Image: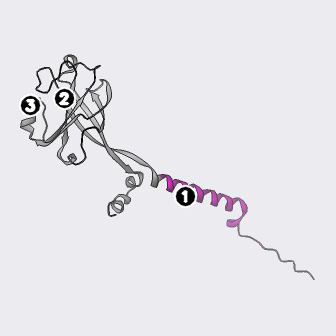
């Protein structure tokens, strides 16, 4: 008599499930590598005003923006950083670079007296030239919102709990 025993594989190891498991594992590995290597920009936001013709720092008809940034950003801000400037609520959006950064904090009263802009906390003042297309005659006194790119951070820091582990390094 011949041995009529057959090897029977459990359903979980059936060929389609086995292939599917390998595909899922490979996709998870690729996703993990992508997330660990991925970088997203880090921004500091501030608000400000386009300086008018009567301003001390005004230069001809070229519009200049004074940006007021939180004191906590003093270590990250320096001239040459890229900035996205939004004039008013629906005005033009510009990509410029910071021209000048005053590292001395100014009090809310000093900012109100010098620039005519209301802030609630001591702030750094950064200056950005808005370019030849923006006239200080037309836009002088207009509010601006600015996002300044100060670096980048890993995508992993966006995951809950991972950020605290990442900072512990």
Res. 29 mark: 1
Q: Earlier in the sequence, mark 3 or mark 2?
A: 2
Q: Which of 42 and 80 is in front in this view?
A: 80
Q: Which residue is drawn at 17% across and 25% down?
A: 51
Q: Nearer the viewer, residue 66 or 19?
A: 66
- Residue range highlighted in magenta: 7-34
> Label 2: which residue?
49
SS state under label 3: helix
**Residue 107 placement (x, y as % from top left):** 8, 41
**Residue 42 placement (x, y as % from top left):** 33, 45
Figure quadrant of the N terminus: bottom right
Figure quadrant of the C terminus: bottom left
Give the distance between the C-alpha atoms of the residues marked 1 and 3, in whole angstroms. 56 Å
Asked whether residue 128 is in view, the answer is yes
Q: Is residue 25 magenta?
A: yes
**Residue 121 placement (x, y as % from top left):** 13, 43
Q: Is residue 94 left or right of residue 17?
A: left
In this rendering, is residue 6 above or below 67? below
Q: Which residue is drawn at 38% across and 57% down?
A: 160
Circle 2 Cα neighbour tier, 10 Å, few/some/many (<14 / 14–19 / ≥20): many
Q: In which quarter of the image is residue 16?
A: bottom right
In this rendering, is residue 132 above or below 104? above
Give the distance between the C-alpha atoms of the residues marked 3 and 2, in whole angstroms. 12 Å
């Amino acid at each position: 008599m011949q041995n009529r025993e057959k090897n029977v594989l459990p359903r979980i190891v059936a060929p389609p499930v086995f292939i599917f498991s390998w595909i899922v594992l490979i996709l998870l590995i690729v996703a993990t590598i992508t997330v660990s290597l991925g970088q997203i920009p880090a921004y500091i936001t501030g608000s400000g005003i386009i300086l008018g013709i009567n301003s001390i720092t005004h230069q001809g008809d070229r519009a200049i923006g004074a940006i007021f940034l939180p004191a906590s950003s003093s270590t990250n801000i320096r001239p040459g950083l890229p900035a996205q400037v939004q004039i008013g609520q629906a005005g033009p959006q510009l990509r410029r670079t910071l021209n000048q950064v005053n590292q001395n904090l100014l009090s809310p009263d000093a900012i109100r007296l010098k620039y005519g802009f209301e802030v609630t906390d001591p702030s750094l003042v950064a200056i950005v030239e808005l370019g030849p297309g923006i006239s200080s005659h037309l836009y002088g006194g207009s509010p601006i919102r600015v996002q300044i790119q100060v670096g980048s951070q890993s995508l992993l820091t966006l995951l809950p709990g991972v950020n605290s582990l990442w900072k512990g390094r």
